[in-house]
Image: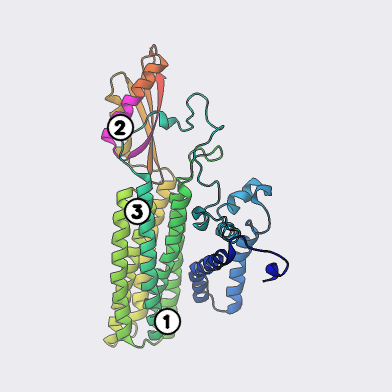
Amino acid sequence: MPGVAIGLRPAGGAPGVLAGLGLLVVFALSLSWAWATLGLLLRTPQAVMSAGTVVLFPLTLASNVFVFPQTMPGWMQAFVNVNPVSHLVTAERGLIAGQAALGEVAWDLPGIVVRGHPGRMHRTSGLRDPAAAYPLAGSRDDAEERRAANRAVAVSAAGLAATGLAELFLAVLTGSVGLLGDAIHNLSDVSTSAVVFLGFRLSRRPPTERYPYGLERAEDLAGIGIAVVIWTSAAFAGFESIRKLIEHGHTAHVGAGIAGAALGIIGNQVVARYKLRTGKRINSATLIADARHSWLDALSSAGALAGLAAVALGQPWGDPVAGLAVTAFICHVGYKVTADVVHRLADGIDPAVITAAEAAAGSVPGVIHAHARARWMGRTLRVEIEGWVDPDLPARGADAIGRQVASAVSRQLPQAGSLTWTSRAAPD
């Protein structure tokens, strides 16, 4: 209203202004789970306000609200360009000015989707990635895999949010710490879904001079967020269980609690199977880790159910003991997920992959000897092969052998997504 009073006339008209307000409301609601979680974890309103300030200040000040990102230092631009507030502000400005494209409303800044890198490529071939010279005959559809991953994340987040809220209501009603831990774990799984979505979104960015391999590894880094959430859930569930065991807390409405635990088992099993199937199909370690997290939630629900059944049989200690058992399950899966994430980030690989790659290269006529290395970057298995060839062979012939090696690797390692071939002169 003050803007209209001083002469501002939105070019987008009333529809643009209303659309902007609607987008703002949707954005606020999408973050409401974070403040609800803080409210449950922290004991006083002052603590919630302090924690919220720590989050809000960087999001609002390190954005494009007040300053053009182009005028900021490079390290700050990297954060501003992925800051959700920056994407929101760009979309709002476009809607009100009547210039918003669909990509802006979907929180895509202009220039994120880059169609090639003119002026930055090597003049010899126009290709930055050496692996592009030796394409693998695979049938992988990256766009379809991303759609499948985003669909799995969205469906699971909606299902877990509904399950977690229902369990949370019943946990407050019954006073069951086992059910409370399970509800918090389900709601935390919604946050891991957001982390997984962000990882997939960042990983689609093409290579640049600063990031010559692109950001495929963002999918693996998202696994760190999942591990952190799992360990945080373990600490919270263990604390609440020990507190109730010491204070001899009371559990009421046991029947309603048992129904909530059963709902948690069913909901989490359905979500876990869906994400696990999708993760295995697209070779996404992060989605598989998230599926294990959901499977863990089903075990948590089973533990809560056992504790409430013990209470119904006249054993009041059953609920806190079940909570401790749930905590132990959480720690076990947290260890496995953390180990898998660290293994990926440390470039760990199945030795059979190296053996198969070297055998494939060695089977090509003209390759005297071969050494191979491989690592996963997101959903892409990158294979690097050094092949020793006849020292008198011209470079064109060595390249031709490299393309034959690519064909052999495609047959023996169908999961390979990238091959870098380097020819060496065999010793006399």
How far separated are the C-alphas under marks 3 and 1? 42 Å
How far separated are the C-alphas under marks 1 and 2? 58 Å
Residue type marked 1? Lys
Q: Are marks 2 and 3 in contact (CB under 8 Å)?
A: no
Image quarter in which the C terminus is found: top left
Element at label 2: helix
Residue 336 makes an appearance in the image:
no
Taking depth in this image into account, of 137 and 176 the one nearest to the observer is 137
Q: Position of residue 371 (x, y in %)?
A: 36, 28
Q: Are marks 1 and 2 in contact (CB under 8 Å)?
A: no
Taking depth in this image into account, of 427 and 170 the one nearest to the observer is 170
The magenta segment: 403-420
Residue type marked 3? Ala
Based on the picture, tell me whether residue 66 belongs to the magenta stretch: no
Q: Quadrant of residue 177?
A: bottom left
Residue type marked 2? Val
- Residue at 51 percent of width and 42 percent of height: 114
Q: Say which residue label 3 marks.
A: 148
Closer to the eye: label 2 or 3: 3
Closer to the eye: label 1 or 2: 2
Based on the picture, tell me whether residue 408 belongs to the magenta stretch: yes
Q: Quadrant of residue 17?
A: bottom right
